[in-house]
């Protein structure tokens, strides 16, 4: 995942690496949770979502952000216990939008993770996966995949930050 032409990340399960020279040299991100879930970013802002507890232990996923392309990281902030983020989108320099289970609800921050808001998903109860994206944190797009068969997914759009959906 490259956030600009020089700064990028490679991650999988228990390891994550960062480059600042377009991929010539890679080094560890500097912390080791039990599992890396997502890395997203844009410009010089990066976000890491990780699981700090051993497999099989219930705890909250953590979110860290970096304003210098992964050279330094904030202290971890916890998402709600039981919430498992699957997809995410960076929102400018200050925000992050996440979708995940088990309910498919959306978590959003617009202030570098200082506060988080839960947005109820418009997805039906039989949704297997909810994939969200946004450019500004106000217009939200949520693709609800209810089955693997073509034509069974539904796309919902909100123009008011998730208060209403069409």
Image (cartoon, rainbow, N blue to C red):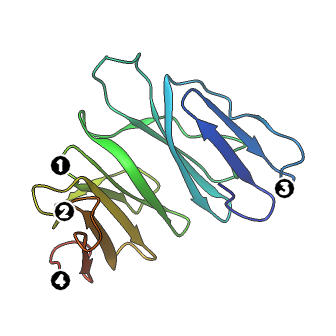
Q: Do the residues under discs 2 and 4 have CB atoms within 8 angstroms?
A: no
Q: How many marks?
A: 4
**Left or right: residue 159 compared with residue 85:** left
Q: Which class describes the residues within 10 Å of circle 2: few (<14), some (14-19), or many (20+)?
A: many
Q: Which mark is residue 121?
A: 2
Taking 21 as reference, is 80 above or below it? above
Q: Earlier in the sequence, mark 1 or mark 3?
A: 3
**Residue 155's x, y, as percent?**
26, 76
Quadrant housing residue 161: bottom left
* In contact (CB < 8 Å): disc 4 and disc 3: no
- Residue at image point 31% right, 52% down: 116
Of labels 1 and 4, earlier in sequence is 1
Check the picture and name the quadrant holding the C terminus: bottom left
Q: Farthest residue in the front direction?
A: 149
- Give how far apart the Cα atoms at labels 1 and 2 are: 8 Å
Q: Are marks 1 and 2 in contact (CB under 8 Å)?
A: yes
Image coords of residue 23 (percent x, y): 83, 50
Say which residue label 1 marks. Answer: 103
For label 1, count other residues whose C-alpha is less than 10 Å away and answer few (under 14), some (14-19) or many (20+).
many
Looking at the image, is mark 1 or mark 2 earlier in the sequence?
A: 1
Q: Earlier in the sequence, mark 2 or mark 3?
A: 3
What residue did someone put label 4 on? 166
Residue picked out by circle 3: 22
Marks 2 and 4, Cα distance to the nearest angstrom?
Answer: 12 Å
Residue at 90% over, 47% down: 24
Q: Few, some or many C-alpha atoms within 10 Å of disc 4 (few <14, some 14-19, many ≥20)? A: few
Instruction: Please report the residue visible at 84 percent of the width from the left and 56 percent of the height from the top.
Output: 22
SS under mark 1: loop
Q: The residue tagged with tag 4: helix, strand or loop?
A: loop
């Amino acid at each position: 995942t490259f956030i600009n032409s020089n700064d990028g990340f490679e991650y999988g399960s228990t390891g994550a690496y960062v480059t600042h020279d377009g991929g010539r040299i890679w080094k560890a991100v500097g912390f080791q949770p039990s599992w890396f879930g997502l890395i997203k970013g844009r410009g010089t802002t990066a976000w890491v979502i990780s699981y700090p507890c051993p497999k099989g232990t219930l705890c909250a996923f953590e979110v860290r952000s970096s304003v210098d392309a992964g050279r330094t990281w904030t202290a971890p902030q916890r998402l709600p216990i039981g919430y498992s983020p699957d997809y995410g989108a960076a929102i400018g320099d200050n925000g992050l939008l996440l979708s995940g289970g088990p309910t498919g609800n959306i978590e959003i921050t617009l202030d570098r993770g200082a506060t988080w808001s839960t947005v109820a998903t418009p997805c039906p109860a039989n949704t297997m996966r909810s994939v969200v994206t946004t450019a500004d944190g106000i217009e939200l797009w949520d693709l609800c995949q209810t089955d693997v068969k073509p034509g069974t997914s539904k796309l919902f759009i909100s123009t008011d930050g998730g208060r209403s959906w069409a």
